[in-house]
Image (cartoon, rainbow, N blue to C red):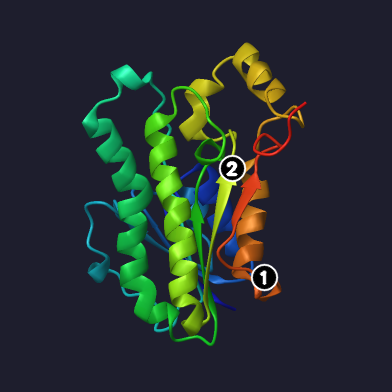
Amino acid sequence: MKNIVIIGCGSGIGLATAKRLAENHHVTAVSRTATPELQLPNVIFHEMDILTGNLDDINFPDAVDGLVYVPGSINLKPFNRLTEEDFRNDFEINVTGAVKSIQKLLPYLKKPSTSSVVLYSSVAAKWGMPFHASVAASKSAVEGLTKSLAAEFSAQNIRVNAIAPSLTDTPLAAHLLSTPEKREASARRHPLHRIGDPVEIAELTDFLLSDKASWITGQVFGIDGGMGSVKL
């Protein structure tokens, strides 16, 4: 069994991913939100806000085979209503938290013969979408970080990839899916005519951490119902 660290797993994609990983791996789970669903035999849970907490307080396994950084934001406003603080907050959540986590876990990731990091971007980083300026800017930085670290860490056999979902049925997106009409309209925007399921993204994350993905690094995988690449 591998040792996997997942940051941000209290709900939605992170929770689905932690539960999936716990089926076959030892999971160190870090989240500001505790949930009874993570009371699983293979999960050690630490309640912590990644932006304000101290990762030195956590006793990580001596060797870490995989790191997953999930925290994100959906801060959708017209550009003229976005403040500098909005941009700073989105960057902190999406980028600075990831940097903090990777820098802390890097010595542990170097110990196995090969290891893997999975970050999360968004379809909005690739496809221009109104009202997404702040989140698109920070998620684009995640994609740049992914490719840069994939190159830098390749000598240590540490793979770094990112997943870029479109709208997924999570608590974070609840306000966008709050009525049947909104849900249907959101589904119709995607070529496959539905929104995402967190379990599907968890399965891709699990694959990217596995030995089956041992020749994959520096990639950004769209799991978005075709929105990022298909025009009907």
Q: Which secondary structure lies at badge 1?
A: helix
Q: Quadrant of the C terminus?
A: top right
Task: Give amino acid for label 1.
Answer: Ala
Residue 71 image position (x, y, % from top left): 41, 48
Location of mark 2 (residue): 165
Q: Are marks 1 and 2 in contact (CB under 8 Å)?
A: no
Q: Is residue 70 above or below residue 109?
A: above
Total tally of numbered discs in the picture? 2
The residue under the point 65% across, 56% down is 204
Q: Is residue 229 at least partly visible in the picture?
A: yes
Q: Is residue 49 above or below residue 197?
A: below
Can you name the residue that lies furthest to the top here? Answer: 181
Which of the 4 image quarters holds residue 77? top left
As drawn, is 136 to the left or to the right of 225?
left
Location of mark 1 (residue): 213
As drawn, is 103 to the left or to the right of 222?
left
Residue 42 image position (x, y, % from top left): 53, 69
Q: Residues within 10 Å of mark 2 (few under 14, many from 20)?
A: many
Q: Which mark is residue 83?
A: none
The residue under the point 55% across, 40% down is 126
The residue under the point 41% across, 36% down is 135
Residue 102 image position (x, y, % from top left): 37, 66
The residue under the point 35% across, 21% down is 79
Q: Is residue 2 above or below residue 54?
A: below
Distance from the alpha carbon under mark 1 to that under mark 2 = 19 Å
Q: Is residue 73 at least partly visible in the picture?
A: no
Q: Nearer the viewer, residue 159 or 155?
A: 155
Q: Is residue 119 above or below residue 87?
A: below
Question: Which label's residue is closer to the chain start, 1 or 2?
Answer: 2
Residue 55 image position (x, y, % from top left): 27, 65
Task: Give amino acid for label 2.
Answer: Pro
Q: Residues within 10 Å of mark 1 (few under 14, many from 20)?
A: few
